[in-house]
Image (cartoon, rainbow, N blue to C red):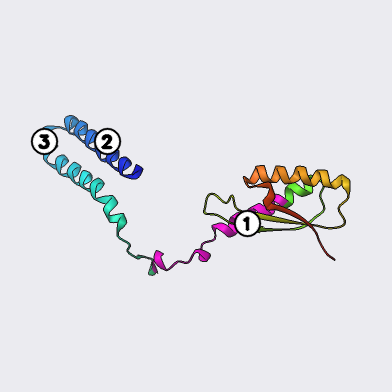
Amino acid sequence: MESLKSWARTVYLVAVISSAALLMIPKSMQKQSKFVIELLLLLCIVAPAVGLVGKSHEVAGIRWDYADLAPEDFSLERFYASEVQRRAVQMGLAAGLRIHSVEVEARGIAPDFSGTKVYVYLTGPIDESEAEVIQKFRELLATHLGIDPKHICFEQLQE
């Protein structure tokens, strides 16, 4: 419904601006100007209907059919996962944690990946002094990523 309101506002705004432009155009160019403005208004009215038609597009000899693209072909999840992995390693090393690797399972629909799970693998045994640092790091990482702290798991790497 909001998109319909936005479309109606756009058409109304184009009509108002067009009528104001017609008042400023000299009489000798009124006929051509009316034609151009009417085409512009018609384009604004018809544009949303054209977007509803699901056509395939051909660009530079390559056919793109959006219906054939599978979600796994889209790389936003992989990009998000790699960025989270990179940030988690950097932040963990800065906090003094002995991080071996980080595994990220990106869950959710872009741009909201709030269901993401992060597995942080640590080298060496975890003692009591590191337990508090790990808890603070979990809270920091959860706040930074906008995910639930329960979705961040720390595991000791088995050698």
Where is 27 relative to 73, above or below? above
Find numbered disc 1 in the image and state the secondary structure of the residue it sits on: helix
Among the 4 quarters of the image, the one containing residue 144: top right
Q: Position of residue 67 (x, y in %)?
A: 40, 66
Q: Which badge, 3 or 2, is on the more N-terminal residue?
A: 2
Q: Which badge, 1 or 3, is on the more N-terminal residue?
A: 3
Where is 21 relative to 119, above or below? above
Q: Amino acid at mark 3?
A: Ser
Q: Measure the C-alpha gap from mark 1 to mark 2.
A: 42 Å
Mark 3 crowd level (few <14, some 14–19, many ≥20, 10 Å Cα): few
Task: Report if residue 40 lies within the magenta region.
Answer: no
Question: 130 and 57: which one is in front?
Answer: 130
Q: Which residue is mark 3?
A: 28
Q: Are marks 1 and 2 in contact (CB under 8 Å)?
A: no
Extent of the magenta region:
63-88
Mark 2 crowd level (few <14, some 14–19, many ≥20, 10 Å Cα): few
Residue occupying the point 24% across, 34% down: 17
Residue occupying the point 88% across, 50% down: 127
Q: Amino acid at mark 2?
A: Leu
Q: Are marks 1 and 3 in contact (CB under 8 Å)?
A: no
Residue 13: numbered disc = 2
Q: Amino acid at mark 1?
A: Ala
- Closest to the camera, between mark 3 and mark 2, is 2
Q: Is residue 69 left or right of residue 9?
A: right
Question: 151 and 104: which one is in front?
Answer: 151
Q: Which residue is mark 1?
A: 81
Task: Report if residue 77 lies within the magenta region.
Answer: yes
Residue occupying the point 83% across, 64% down: 158
Q: Quadrant of the N terminus?
A: top left
Find numbered disc 3 in the image and state the secondary structure of the residue it sits on: helix
Q: Are marks 3 and 2 in contact (CB under 8 Å)?
A: no
Q: Position of residue 101 (x, y in %)?
A: 75, 59
